[in-house]
Image (cartoon, rainbow, N blue to C red):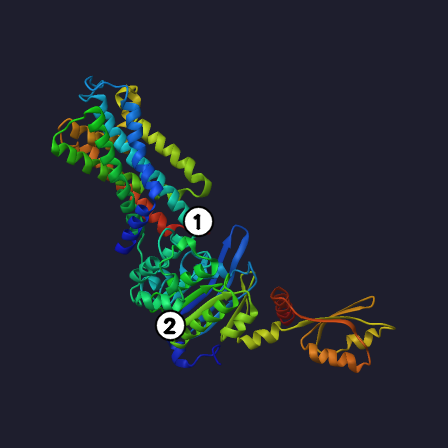
Amino acid sequence: MTQTAPPTEQRTAPSVVSFENVNKSYGDVRAVADLSLRLHPGETVALLGPNGAGKSSTLDLLLGLRNADSGTVSLFGMTPAQAINAGKVGAMLQSGGLMEDVTVRELVKLGCDLHPKPHPVAEVMDRAGIAQIADRKVNKLSGGQEQRVRFALATVGANDLIVLDEPTTGMDVTARQAFWATMREQAAQGRTVLFATHYLEEADAIADRVLVLHKGRLLADGTAAEIKAKAGARRVSFDLEGAIDEAALRALPFLSTIDISGRTVRIQSHDADATMHAVYGLGLYPRNLEVAGLGLEQAFVAITSAEEANAA
Amino acid sequence: MNTLIKLEITRTLRNKKFMFFSVVYPSALYLLFAASQNSTDKVKGTDLTFPALYMVSMASFGAITAVLMGNSEKIAKEREKGWVRQLRLTTLPGRGYVLAKIASAGVVTLPCIVVVFLVAAVTKGVRFEAWQWGALTVAIWAGSLCFAALGVAIGYIASGDAVRPITMIIYFGLSILGGLWMPSTVFPQWLQNIAEWLPTHAYAALGQAIELGDAPHGKDLAILVFYFLLFAGGAAWLYRKDTLKA
């Protein structure tokens, strides 16, 4: 995949999404800090970051629900409002509510009627997996069902860009898989899909490009594999008996950090397999061995400190 | 846009409790106010009997209650739940949302008005020419749309817990000062001078002119149209501008 360096014919077409030096603050909180990015046609892009990283703010700016303090946001070379009126954008918001006291079918029909290039109502409901709850009142749905109705509203017409804010929240595993299968179909039809998530696994499985956002800044932009390599450190801890040879431990391969306190050794490693192989190679017998992936939050810290080290 | 208007009307009609109380409330108040009044004395400063005057007042008041209370709270709630954010991701123009809300309010006020008229005619023997009944219905119904627009605007300005008190203050203030509860002729002159320019006063005056066999006054019509455009325009502007975080 070469999404980060698209072929020239894609470069000359206006970007699907373009942010140029966009800033947004709420009081003292900088939600989006000097953000510049471009999305190209046909990409499936994950906006990855922990809670409070600025994902939702970024999507709000992208959709024109809020205005940037400075910088420009454009979709297909237009303002967000123009792009929405041209029927180019479908969106599923985390904070998007639904109309109450109406049935699912009535609500989807409303969405179809408001779209300039609508799909048939039945087709939209089938795709979203809500045909069997079509006659149910919107305010009587479970969380997962509500999400599917939101998804239906985001796909009522032939959009070129689909924006999803943490779309699988509240869905069980089966629903999640079905959801992403549908999303892949949309992408296969040449649509650009942008979704926000705080699951690295989800970004890895679905996206061919991952944007990592932390404290409103764009930390990394690359393929899922590249991001995983950056953030893929593991935490290893074990206890040792007998005399501890600190120098030998500190010389272990692939270490990023090591902390020895009493009998307990705590390590962060880029390649836990190789590090442990070396531990056994020293003739040691580690007890109470634990190996765990870093949480996304810590992975971001790892990426941030790596960036800062590079800058220094 | 038409789909949204239809859907808003359907929704309102489905809300049986709201419909029932909206329709019954003004008639009950009418009976309460008019019960002790006889049907022959004229109200000071007008040429109308109490039951006839109160019929218009309570029909107007009931219509205002339904649209002001219903709209402002519903809209504030829809904003908080994020439905308005979702709608803003569609091609719906701001005026479409506001018109749909006003239309659904109109559905509630029509039965309100008709029931008050029926109660007045049956219990207090209020009698008018056929054209007057028709004109009264149309005038009070159309006038209520002005307050429906006000309800939408309040729903946008206020949020959360503030909606109800703000609506109440505006609602009672406008109703009392506009002379819906007691004829404004009992007010001191300086208050009458202010009341004259309120939308509620113009609204009640429409009906009273018709009861006296006149055409509604141009000034009252102009005042209502002015307020309608102000409220509806303001609401549509606020819809597009609304940046409330859900």
Quadrant of the snapshot with the N terminus of chain B: bottom left
For label 2, the SS is loop
| Residue that carries the numbered disc 1 in the rendered image | B80
Label 1 chain ID: B
Label 2 chain ID: A
- Disc 1 to disc 2, how far (Cα)? 35 Å
| A215 to the left or right of B175 | right
Query: Dot 1, how many residues are within 10 Å of its Cα: few (below 14), some (14-19), or many (20+)?
Result: some
When the figure is inspected, residue A137 is found, relative to residue B49, above or below; the finding is below
> Which residue is rendered at x = 82% and y = 73% of the image?
A246
> Which residue is rendered at x = 69% and y = 76% of the image?
A272
B31, A269: nearer the viewer = B31
**Residue B180 visible in the snapshot:** no
For label 1, the SS is helix
Q: Quadrant of residue B225?
A: top left
| Residue that carries the numbered disc 2 in the rendered image | A14
Q: Position of residue A279 (x, y in %)?
A: 77, 78
Q: Position of residue A200 (x, y in %)?
A: 56, 69
Q: Quadrant of residue B112?
A: top left
Residue lying at the far bottom in this picture: please name it: A281
